[in-house]
Amino acid sequence: MTAPCSCKSPRPANRLRLDYRAEAKRLGTPVVPIIDAHTHINGEHASALYAEARELYGITETWSQTQFPQAKAIKKVLGDSIHFVAVPDYMSDDPAHAHGQGYLDRITEWHEQLGTRIVKFWCAPRGRDYAKESSGDPRTLTLDSPWRRKQMEHAANLGFMFMAHIADPDTWFKTKYTDTSFYGTKASQYEPLERLTDEYDVPWLVAHMGGWPEDLPFLTGLLDRHPNIILDTSATKWMVRELSLHPRAELLAFFHRFQGRILFGSDIVTMDAHLSTDEGPRNMGSQASSADEAFELYASRYWALRTLFESAYEGESPIADPDLHMVDPDRFDEFAAPVLSGKSLPTDELTILYRQATLDTLHAWHNRP
């Protein structure tokens, strides 16, 4: 039984009007303290709200793709419980430089100033639009572009492990990426990954269940072919929608087969803009515009993932999922959400997913001499 909140109307992160603080108590303490291997924590004030949400839901450590200029301020809020993943300057006024020589230089800064040992390569198909606009070459951000190769070589020499965003949801390939001559097919996104994971014998964390949670047989083949690939469960809306669709026995068999190679991650994004009281035009794509909404945004992700993995809950997700409307606007509005089908993972599986897998991979690599 879920607990309603006192908010007057549903919000994108709280369609069901849950009291997320009461829900955290109802879920109780997780089987082990949870490590979130995939977040984007920015904003000193927002990070304090995030700290409350993660404490309520039993998360004790966070790996974050924080913007470099904010890292020290975020470290003051979260202390030694936050660890950083190197990312380029996404906010730069000169994106061509920021994702080229600028990222080479930034990797060195992450390493020397913050001791970072994980580097992120964002290779989403929509990056081709971004790259075309910023540099004229739509392939600048693909995994095997010349600049990427230089960055990989530099990072490998400094002792980094790699993280990559390779593909987006099937729903996007049905709607946003229909021009395969420009974006490629979903399967084609993995061709450079398979080559480069063989070339660079370091752990590769492929985010968002490898980018293909819809297809467990494909992921099985990918993981069998490349023992240095690991996955995380980040991108909560996407994971709730697609992992809920798999029969429990099939998903459990997948998690069991690849124990230690699947890490818990949420993909929570925090920023001080979420706390703004200037509401402006509101729509279901808006994330948050007050402290209350920001807290719900962050807490909802932990509620959804813990409910998915720990419980037998069967009902609508509290988080609006615009992908449903995008694919089938006649059936779904922008406030619609998929069914969340809890999988009740056994305690030993939860222990590995929530904590041990990250200790054995990210922590072990980060603490190498």
Image: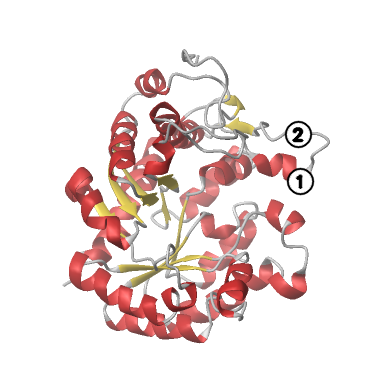
Residue located at (45% from left, 75% from top):
99
- In depth, the one of 336 and 305 nearer the eye is 336
List x then y, in percent, for residue 260.
38, 55
- The numbered mark at residue 327 is 1
- Residue 134 vertical position relative to residue 42 in the rendered view, above or below: below
Q: Is residue 149 left or right of residue 129?
A: left
Q: Secondary structure at mark 2?
A: loop
Frontmost residue, 275 versus 208: 275
Question: Can you see residue 368?
Answer: no
As drawn, the label of residue 332 is 2
- Whether 178 is drawn above or below 137: the answer is above
Q: Is residue 336 left or right of residue 264?
A: right
Which residue is drawn at the image coordinates 46% and 32% (left, top)?
300
2 and 1 marks in contact (CB < 8 Å) = yes
Q: Quadrant of residue 123?
A: bottom right
Q: Which mark is residue 77?
A: none
Quarter of the view holding residue 351: top left
Q: Identify the image quadrant of the C terminus.
A: bottom left
Camera-nearest residue between 282 and 221: 282
Left of 321 or right of it: where is 228? left
For the question of whether residue 341 can be seen, the reply is: yes
Give the amino acid at mark 2: Phe
